Image: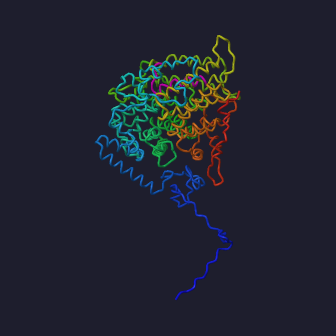
């Protein structure tokens, strides 16, 4: 039996084949994202998936992290990571014993598995393990002018005749920027091969067990690697101790020149230069090993405050250095004052002190190192020195410098012999210079109602003292023979101080028989920039160097002041290559020091030319978290200034971060409009 079906009528308003309007609105589907960030996943919060920081994380003011790539789901990311571990297992299984041990060492050091596998697949590690390596001996410059752009022409410049710049027979190689190290003579390696590929050539290092000095890590190889980083990249410029006494005491198991406190402080300082540590610049993160070394050092320091020893003073000074590198200067000043106070308590500055069980050379070295550090910090912060007088210990004569301060030997790729870096001569020259710097700072920054400056007569007398120091440099540190980064820094400090004391007089006219301040500044700036360019050309700007935190901003913002838009086209383009080079260096050092990354962002914001901003953006592989920088940095270090401008004020990076990372409605930090320029008049344009 069939039943008649009811006829379906069209929806209201649907006539003549036109679709009708629905009686009730259709709900739009919830927008979906491929993968939520880790904080939102843990809190089961609906993630908006913006990168680098999603909405909920911005609102809560927390670190936003993704374990997925931009277009990945979590299952895709899991598959990718699983494949990386599978590939790594296969590589280790196929490797010989030595190669496998090196791979395991890199894994233990915390190197990312995917990055490790990728480096092997791209041939980098295989070159290191299996082939005779080729090393870059000359880094390419941004722009079209090469190492020396036109604006550096026409001024006396001894560094253009240096072996490092053009004297090496490998300056122009047939195969471009790379060469086989076996083809380089023993005496030429120090001039032809970047310093960051050397190994510390000290047999004592292999016999050390540093695990008994720290509870932070029990990896013997990692701790030895960090000590090597410290002795290669920090110790030559900021010593704080005598390496021979430290290493010998660790071999013997003695505790006069070594302690758990000192080793943890050294490890915290070295972490910034440990390139396998992906988070080395993120000093605030609990999953950062440097965070734990520093926390342990601070804890042990508090325990020793009641009964300080010789190593307590050294550790406090190193902790102040770490705090400066971390951009928390308020803490750094506390620790440097604490180091000086502890030094006085243990008799470090008293020739008749109770430090009878400590070798006299170690006492003298540490006293001078602490003096040198406070001299550097106070001068570049435009502060009166904390120690007006140098230590009451005479410095050794130049011919005894190596026997007194010791030597650091390194080994270059393809070489069977050890190469000295002339540490003794360098250390003595630094001590002599810091005495002069301290005297200038004591007079220049004494509290007055006037802007800081020496009289013109005082300035020329100071120049004469500086020139006498410069002309008496040992042969190893002459402009002709300088080779490694710390050699270049010895010369940079000379030109930077010259610029600083003459800048207030740059418009003063002088008799024809007297060289004008304007010319003196121009020559010093030419030499300073040439040294920075040679540094980059031979060694690059990626490897950690604390001094670049000071010198790169000085050159960068000086270039902005001197390279205004009214210059002729060729000279303007010439100076812009310097700005690009400095930006490259700041970004590279930003991977080691967060403060450098903040200054890079500040420098970019100071640029007015859209093409320059675009070229800087091409260097960056991620977006800066300026809100995080504002939250973590407590820096008072003046940025890009040779002397105090008449306007004064806060000359650090903090005002920029406050401008760029302003509070958004949801409680997080929102960036200013991309096209809005930051007024850097205090840094870019000194008042007349």
- Count the numbered circles shown: 0
Judge from the rendering whether residue 249 lies leftward or rightward of residue 590; answer left or right. Answer: left
**Is 569 left, or right, of 159 in this rendering?**
right
Q: Quadrant of the C terminus?
A: top right
| Residue 402 seen in the figure | yes
Q: Nearer the viewer, residue 202 or 521?
A: 521
The image quadrant of residue 619 is top right
The magenta span reads: 480-499
Position of 319 with respect to 244 (left or right) is right
Give the image location of residue 344, x and y in percent: 51, 33
Q: Position of residue 324 (x, y in %)?
A: 54, 37
Nearest the eye: 124 or 414: 124
- Colour scheme of the picture: rainbow
| Nearest the eye: 49 or 275 | 49
The answer to whether residue 445 of the structure is visible from this angle is no
Residue 474, how many percent across, how many down? Answer: 46, 18
Q: Which residue lies furthest to the top in this view?
A: 513
In this view, which residue lies farthest toward the bottom? 1
Position of residue 175 relative to residue 296, above or below, is: above
Q: Is residue 53 above or below residue 533?
A: below
Q: Which residue lies furthest to the front in this view?
A: 16
Residue 272 on the magenta span? no
Q: Name the residue at 61% across, 64% down.
A: 28
Task: Between residue 377 and residue 485, name the one nearer to us.
Answer: 485
| Residue 682 at x, y percent in the picture | 67, 33
Predominant secondary structure in magenta? Answer: helix
Residue in the picture at 45% in, 57% down: 75
| Residue at 59% in and 42% down | 634
């Amino acid at each position: 039996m069939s039943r008649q079906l009811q006829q379906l009528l069209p929806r209201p308003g649907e006539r003549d084949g036109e679709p009708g309007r629905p009686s009730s609105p259709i709900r739009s589907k919830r927008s979906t994202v491929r993968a939520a960030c880790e904080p939102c996943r843990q809190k089961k919060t609906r993630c908006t998936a913006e990168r680098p920081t999603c909405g909920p994380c911005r609102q809560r003011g927390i670190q936003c992290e993704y374990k997925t790539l931009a277009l990945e789901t979590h299952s895709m990311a899991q598959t990718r990571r699983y494949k990386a571990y599978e590939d790594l297992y296969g590589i280790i299984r196929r490797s010989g014993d030595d190669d496998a041990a090196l791979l395991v060492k890199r894994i233990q050091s915390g190197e990312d598995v995917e990055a490790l596998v990728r480096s092997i697949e791209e041939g980098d590690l295989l070159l290191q393990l299996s082939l005779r390596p080729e090393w870059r001996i000359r880094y390419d410059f941004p722009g079209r002018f090469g190492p020396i752009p036109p604006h550096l022409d026409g001024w006396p410049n001894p560094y253009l005749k240096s072996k490092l710049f053009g004297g090496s027979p490998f300056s122009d190689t047939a195969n471009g920027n790379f060469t086989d190290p076996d083809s380089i003579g023993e005496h030429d390696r120090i001039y032809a091969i970047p310093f960051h590929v050397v190994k510390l050539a000290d047999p004592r290092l292999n016999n050390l067990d540093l695990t008994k000095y720290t509870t932070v890590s029990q990896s013997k190889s990692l701790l030895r690697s960090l000590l090597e980083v410290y002795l290669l990249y920090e110790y030559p410029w900021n010593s704080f101790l005598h390496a021979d006494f430290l290493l010998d005491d660790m071999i013997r198991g003695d505790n006069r020149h070594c302690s758990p406190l000192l080793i943890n402080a050294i490890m915290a300082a070295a972490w910034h230069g440990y390139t396998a540590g992906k988070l080395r610049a993120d000093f605030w993160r609990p999953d950062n090993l440097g965070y734990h070394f520093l926390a342990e050092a601070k804890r042990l320091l508090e325990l020793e405050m009641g009964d300080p020893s010789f190593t307590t003073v050294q550790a406090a000074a190193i902790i102040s250095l770490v705090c400066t590198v971390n951009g928390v200067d308020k803490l750094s000043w506390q620790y440097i004052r604490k180091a000086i106070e502890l030094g006085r308590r243990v008799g470090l500055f008293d020739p008749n002190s109770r430090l009878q069980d400590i070798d006299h050379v170690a006492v003298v070295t540490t006293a001078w190192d602490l003096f040198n550090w406070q001299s550097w910090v106070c001068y570049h912060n435009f502060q009166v020195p904390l120690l007006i007088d140098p230590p009451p210990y005479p410095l050794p004569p130049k011919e005894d410098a190596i026997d007194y301060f010791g030597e650091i030997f390194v080994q270059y790729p393809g070489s069977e012999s050890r190469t000295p870096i002339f540490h003794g001569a360098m250390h003595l020259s630094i001590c002599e210079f810091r005495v002069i710097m301290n005297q200038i700072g004591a007079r220049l920054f004494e509290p007055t109602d006037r802007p800081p400056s020496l009289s013109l007569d005082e300035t020329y007398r100071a120049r004469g003292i500086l020139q006498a120091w410069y002309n008496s440099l040992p042969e190893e540190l002459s402009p002709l023979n300088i080779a490694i980064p710390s050699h270049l820094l010895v010369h940079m400090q000379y030109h930077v101080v010259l610029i600083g004391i003459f800048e207030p007089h740059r418009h003063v006219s002088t008799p024809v028989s007297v060289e004008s301040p304007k010319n003196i500044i121009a020559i010093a700036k030419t030499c300073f920039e040439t040294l920075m360019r040679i540094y980059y050309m031979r060694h690059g700007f990626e490897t950690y160097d604390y001094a670049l935190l000071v010198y790169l901003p000085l050159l960068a913002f000086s270039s902005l002041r001197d390279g205004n838009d009214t210059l002729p086209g060729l000279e303007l383009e010439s100076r812009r290559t310097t700005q690009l080079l400095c930006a490259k260096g700041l970004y590279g050092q930003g991977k080691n020091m967060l403060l450098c990354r903040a200054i890079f962002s500040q420098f970019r914001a100071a640029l007015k030319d859209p093409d320059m901003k675009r070229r800087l953006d091409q260097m960056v592989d991620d977006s800066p978290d300026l809100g995080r920088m504002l939250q973590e940095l407590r820096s008072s270090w003046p940025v890009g200034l040779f002397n105090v401008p008449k306007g004064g004020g806060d000359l650090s990076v903090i005002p920029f971060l406050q401008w760029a990372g302003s509070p958004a409605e949801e409680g997080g930090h929102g960036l200013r409009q991309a096209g809005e320029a930051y007024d850097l008049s205090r840094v870019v344009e000194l008042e007349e």
